[in-house]
Image: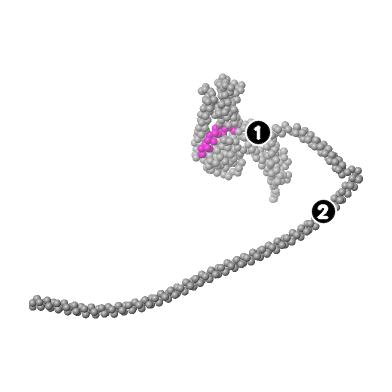
Amino acid sequence: MDIVTIIILGIAGIAGGFGLAKIIEKSNISNLIKNAKKEAASILKDANLEAENIKKDKILQAKEKFIELKSEHEQVILSRDQKMAEVEKRIRDKESQVSNELSKAKRVNDDYEAKTLEYNSKIDTSNKKQAEVDKLHKSQLQHLEVISGLSAEEAKNQLVEGLKAEAKTEAMSHIQDTIEEAKLTAQQEAKKIIINTIQRVGTEEAVENCVSVFNIESDDVKGRIIGREGRNIRAIEAATGVEIIVDDTPEAIILSCFDPVRREIARLALHKLVTDGRIHPARIEEVVAKTTKQIDDEIIEVGKRTVIDLGIHGLHPELIKVVGRMKYRSSYGQNLLQHSREVSKLCGIMAAELGLNVKLAKRAGLLHDIGKVPDAESDLPHALLGMQWAEKYGEKEEVCNAIGAHHDEIEMKSLLSPIIQVCDAISGARPGARRQVLDSYIQRLKDLEEVAYGFGGVKNAYAIQAGRELRVIVESEKVSDENAATLSFEISQKIQTEMTYPGQVKVTVIRETRAVNIAK
């Protein structure tokens, strides 16, 4: 075979293949068209079904919405009807109330008019009776004038003149009696007033030593202390607050002041000035300032040393200063610091024996008399003042109660309180502890008891607590419970006006009724 034949056969084969392909393609296209038509019909059918479903759903939703709106509308209409009903009810109530008020006002008005008419008639009747009385009075006066031969005005004048003379005579007599009585009692009343005044302002400090004696080598030093025209002594008094008495006493100058700390400052300052030899106002102020600082430091140091010696811890700095000030305070000649140290030790021993808190007992014993060294004057007893300070500076309740109750001003609430009271009495009552005249002390107690015996119904009277309290036992048949309070007040008033004493005196009246029978 040659090439031409091959080519021709190849072309013929290609043409045949193309024709076959065309036939196959037509067959496939017709099949595709049929399938597409079937699918289109199916889609249209599904679309119609879905459209019907959607239409039904929308119709249902519209019906539900309509029902919902209808329900809301009905509720709104119902609420409006209710509100209208309420408004109508309120209006009916208001109308009823107004009608009631109107009827009530009408009744009140009718009552008022009736009472007005009644009162007018009574007034008319009263006026008629008053006119009759005036007429009768006038006729009676005329009748009396005829009988007495005097007119009413003349009789009135005579009566007034007689009463004036009588009143003047009685008044003159009363005035004369008052003058004579005043002359007799004026001096006594004046003394009583002065004594009462001194008694009110005086405190327990009045029983202490109020002066210190400053010894000097020679009387020449007195002139230097006084200074030119008294400048130096005035400067010392102004700087220290102490009165300096320079008299004819040889080789001595007296320092007078109620405050023992100020007296000690003045004594030490004078000692430094005399030793130095330079005495003039500027130097005096400098020395007094240094001495004051020295004493303050010494007070704190004494307080700290005392607290350490007694084994007391955690004491407030202000209480430590108060303890240090006790060094310069004495009571009946007994140094207050030594007394407080002694009481503290005794309390510790007694508390240990009784199985109580030893540290608290020592603490309360040391602080029991802190009320005797106040920075300012107070009307409170020293026990209550000390209790207030202890409470202020954070002391325990047991310690505060022991301080306040050691002279029975308040009720004892712990076992420490009687221990402090007993140890205080032991320290003050031991031989040589206090410098006090026994006779005057006993006489004071007797005077207190005699005051009580001067009242009716008193059976027994006992002065206790060193004269700070008076117990009065009365007879129950003669003195009632109501009279007991009056008797206590009268006794206290009589003690207050007739006696001189430091501090306070508590008067207790005791009345009891006993019924005793014996079974045999």
Task: Name which residue type carries label 2.
Answer: Asn
What's drawn in magenta, residue-wise?
315-337
Magenta run includes residue 212: no
Q: Is residue 459 visible?
A: no
Q: Residues within 10 Å of mark 1 (few under 14, many from 20)?
A: few
Q: Nearer the viewer, mark 2 or mark 1?
A: 2
Picture coordinates of residue 197, whole percent (x, y): 66, 34
Task: Name which residue type carries label 1.
Answer: Ile
In the structure shown, which secondary structural element does the residue marked by tag 2 occupy? Answer: helix
**Quadrant showing the N terminus:** bottom left
Q: Which residue is mark 1?
A: 198
Quadrant of the image occupied by residue 400? top right
User: Which of 61/246 is in front?
Assistant: 61
Judged left or right of residue 10, residue 241 is right
| Residue positioned 68% across, 43% down in the render | 509
In the structure shown, which secondary structural element does the residue marked by tag 1 occupy? Answer: helix
Q: CA distance from mark 2 to mark 1?
A: 69 Å
Q: Is residue 265 above or below residue 366?
A: above
Q: Is residue 34 above or below residue 243?
A: below
| Residue positioned 60% across, 22% down in the render | 249
Tally of numbered discs: 2
Quadrant of the image occupied by residue 244? top right
Q: Which residue is mark 2?
A: 127
**Mark number for residue 186?**
none
Judged left or right of residue 51, residue 394 is right
Judged left or right of residue 510, residue 47 is left
Picture coordinates of residue 203, whole percent (x, y): 62, 35
Of labels 2 and 1, earlier in sequence is 2
- Which secondary structure dominates the residues rendered in magenta? helix
Q: Is residue 248 visible?
A: yes
Magenta run includes residue 335: yes
